[in-house]
Image (tube, rainbow, N blue to C red):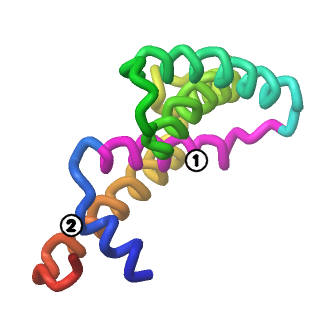
Amino acid sequence: MKLLIQYLYQLKLDKAILWCYLIWYIVIVYFYFDPSPKIWINAVGISAVIGTALVLSVSSGKGGKRDRWQTFRLYLMPFCVSSFSALIKGQGFIVVISPKIKETLVAVSCCALFLFVVLVIKRIPNKIT
């Protein structure tokens, strides 16, 4: 638990935004989950192709140590984008916003709760690090 609190204490805005993207994705998957293997296999395939291209695009070519979390994110993002796209197809979404206000409110509320927790942790005196 201390590691989680320390991570959230040190979390920068750019990474917090990425966490909100993931929270939004999870909420939408919760509401629109489809167990069809085709969606998930295609998402894995797209993730492999695009993720590899992204890893190659950010590598320095010097063979140095790679950041495992960055590499994970570079593969996770295409997976999430492709599966999200497949799940919301024909559902009336406007970009990433659900046409059902309840679903949008749940996603916004979850992101707001996460950001609130991060803010509260950041206000704790600097005894965490």
124 over 25 or under it: above or below: below
State whether residue 40 appears in this view: yes
- Find residue 68 and report its horizontal and vertical position in percent: 50, 44
Residue 16 is covered by the magenta coloring: yes
Where residue 44 sits, quadrant-wise, is top right
Q: Amino acid at mark 2?
A: Leu
Where residue 28 sits, quadrant-wise, is top right
Q: How many other residues sit within 10 Å of disc 1, few (<14), some (14-19) or many (≥20)?
A: some
Of the numbered discs 1 and 2, the one sitting upstream in the chain is 1
Most foreground residue, 42 or 93: 42
Disc 1 element: helix
Q: Amino acid at mark 1?
A: Ile
- Checking the image for residue 119, the label placed there is 2
- Find residue 52 and report its horizontal and vertical position in percent: 59, 20
Name the image quarter holding the C terminus: bottom left
- Find residue 57 and report its horizontal and vertical position in percent: 43, 15
Q: Which residues are magenta?
A: 15-34
What residue is rendered at 77% in x and 21% in y? 42
Q: Which residue is mark 1?
A: 26
